[in-house]
Amino acid sequence: MQKIMPLTDLQRTAGSVLADLSSTDESVVITHRGRPAAVLISVARYQAIEADLERLDELELVELVREARQEHAAGEMIPHHEVVERIQRKFAPKQKNKRRAS
């Protein structure tokens, strides 16, 4: 279960809150003026979240490579020169309209 704690309570009991974080897997939502402002979690839980996110990035990359291979096998490719042209058009600096002197 998630704990909810006002910032003023955290200020008074920070030591025990930190001790509880390391001994439990619970998170603590810190409120400021009655609204959620931050979440405290243990370092172990934070590291697990980071590892999970890294793994999700890897899985996403694997899926993109798989899709690209399928497209390649199906002949759904764009020639290199067309890719370069698209990139140049997309990232080319915008030309400003110049006024002609009358």
Image: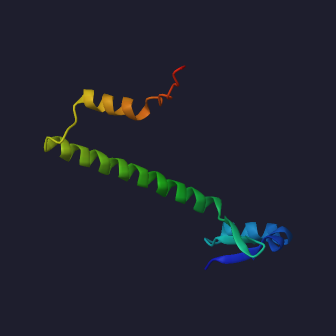
Does 98 sit above or below residue 71? above
Q: What colour scheme governs how the chains and residues are painted in the rendered image of this protein?
A: rainbow
Looking at the rendered image, the quarter that the N terminus falls into is bottom right
Which residue is the extreme one toward the bottom?
Answer: 1
Residue drawn at x 68%, y 77% as measured from the top left:
3
- Asked whether 32 or 61 is in front, the reply is 32
Does 37 sit above or below residue 1? above
Q: Is residue 1 left or right of residue 66?
A: right
Does 53 sit above or below residue 70? below
Q: Is residue 60 left or right of residue 54?
A: left
Q: Is residue 63 left or right of residue 22?
A: left
- Asked whether 4 or 45 is in front, the reply is 4
- Asked whether 41 or 35 is in front, the reply is 35
Which residue is the extreme one toward the front?
Answer: 102
Residue drawn at x 43%, y 29% as measured from the top left:
92
Residue drawn at x 31%, y 48% as measured from the top left:
64
Does 53 sit above or below residue 86? below
Residue drawn at x 78%, y 73% as measured from the top left:
33
The location of residue 56, given as percent across then percent down, is 42, 55
The location of residue 48, given as percent across then percent down, is 53, 59
Image quadrant where residue 7 sits: bottom right
The location of residue 94, given as percent across then percent down, is 47, 31
Looking at the rendered image, the quarter that the C terminus falls into is top right
- Asked whether 95 or 9 is in front, the reply is 95
Which residue is the extreme one toward the top?
Answer: 101
The location of residue 5, given as percent across then percent down, is 74, 75
Q: Is residue 33 left or right of residue 41?
A: right
